[in-house]
Amino acid sequence: MHQPGWWPGMISGMACLFAGMGQVMLDAADPAPSFPLMTTPTLRTLASGPGPEDLDLIEWKGRTALLTATYSRARFPREPHPKPRVGALEIYLPGEDRFQPAPMASTPPEHFAPVGLSVVRNSLAPGLEGKQLAYVTNAYPGKGLLARGGAVEVFEVDDDAGQVKHLGTLGGGRSKLLHKINGITASRDGTVYATTFGTFPAKTGEAELLEPNSPAGQTRTINSVVCFTPDKADATKGTWGVVASGINGANGLALSPGETLLYCNAYHGRQILAFERYEQPGGELKKCHGVVYRGLPFRPDNLKCPPNGDLWCTGQRSPVPTFLHLLSGARLPSRGGVARLHWDAGHFKLRHDAEWVKDLDGDTHAPSVAVPLGDAFYLGHIMHAGVTEVRLHPKRQAPVHAASPPTVNTNAHANAEKPQSEGAAR
């Protein structure tokens, strides 16, 4: 989750504080799950730049590694705040003690405040075939903290040369459709999806599909999914358009392994939604399957789908400490949780261990993303200069709880057909 801007952040943060207090009380009143202890996690902090909110897997030096993007959100830093803001990409190889700055073959954008990132290995995008690409959301692409709009930067992560190169800004620059940009995911054909996050819960929370080239698809709106459709000759050039709106806190995104389904977190609704894509290249969505999982024990931030097809969903239990941090830089304890989901027999199932979440209270810096690598998974945060390595020591098989099929309103049609299982590997 990210809330750019100082003055808008102050207003929205104060409003969210008072609105969130009631929600915190509701959370506290929820009965505690009675699942037995299944795992005993071991936590270790890996040094990195400030605020690595998002992580993803890359190939680096012949090994699978982690990529992250960091920048300082401090409102009142001890040292003068960098002007313009300049974020950085960092890489972690398993076994090392910290993230290292990525060797850059070109200078990053002048104003670079990265929030989310999505890595595509072996791209099929026009003009970028075979390359390993990192798409990074840029929350402050213009001068000043009140700059409107957002952007997505694309980098080539060249494993052979051992360098990272900035290839350009998708669409040629900032777009008003990307104001309050947050989550991101990219397909191999060069189509990119991003979310615009709304501070306040939506009144209805009913997702609606839009034609990206229609007047509605060219109108800036929050709590939406925005899509970049690349040109046929150059994947860094193309057009942005809104393809879905009305999501109750649009946040993390992920594509299924076969790239036929687009998943989206609803932060305020504690839900995961699914959209079906057309088979031909392009970002237009074919169908909205609505809420496919509801009742998460935290507000879901980022969503990741590693090659094995599991979905890793991460978020915070209360939005109040997070918004206070984005408003003033205060670092209050902000706990969260991680859930691993998988697709089975046409329904999402959640593998969730209540004691595991409780033990992760030791990580109090607003966890925002979880990415598995080897025998551990790694947590990025909103208010923490470091990444937490979590190793699990299972005691018995974790319980699997099937989500009941919800009744969903999609485009004024109830009880939408559920998407089918996929077997393709990404």
Image (cartoon, helix red, strand yellow):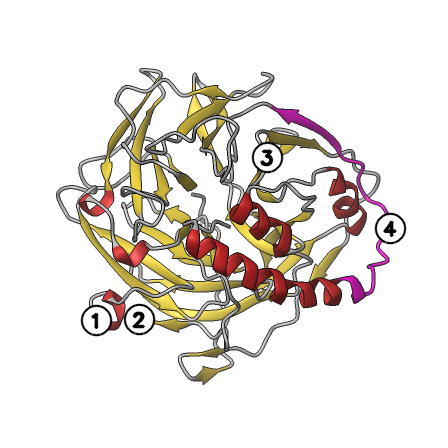
Please report contact status of discs 1 and 4: CB closer than 8 Å, yes or no.
no
Residue 416 x, y percent position in the rendering: 48, 77
Per the image, label 3 sits on a secondary structure element best described as loop
Q: Nearer the viewer, mark 3 or mark 1?
A: 3
Q: Residue 292's x, y, as percent? A: 55, 66
Query: Which residue is at 26% across, 67% downward?
Result: 219
Tell me the CA gap for discs 4 and 3: 30 Å
Q: Earlier in the sequence, mark 4 or mark 3?
A: 4
Could you tell me the amino acid type at mark 1?
A: Ser
Between marks 2 and 3, how big is the CA–CA gap? 37 Å
Q: Which mark is residue 36?
A: 4
Q: Which residue is mark 3?
A: 384
In the image, taking residue 281 as reference, residue 303 lies left or right, namely right
Give the mark, 3 or 1, whose residue is nearer the N terminus. 1
Q: Amino acid at mark 4?
A: Pro
x and y, in percent, of residue 237 in the image:
17, 45
Whether residue 76 is visible here, answered yes or no, is yes
Image quadrant containing the C terminus = top left
User: Do the numbered discs 1 and 2 sit on residues whose CB atoms are within 8 Å?
Assistant: yes
The amino acid pointed to by label 3 is His
Q: Which residues are magenta?
A: 28-46
Q: Residues within 10 Å of mark 1 (few under 14, many from 20)?
A: few
Q: Secondary structure at mark 4?
A: loop
Which mark's residue is nearer the viewer, 1 or 4? 1
Q: Which mark is residue 214?
A: 1
When the figure is inspected, residue 400 is found, relative to residue 99, above or below; the finding is below
Measured along the vertical axis of the image, is residue 66 above or below residue 269? above
Marked residue nearer the N-terminal end (2 or 3) = 2
User: Could you say which disc has been placed on residue 210 in the image?
Assistant: 2
Instruction: Determine the CA span between mark 1 and mark 4.
Output: 52 Å
- Give 113 or 65, whichever is nearer the viewer: 113
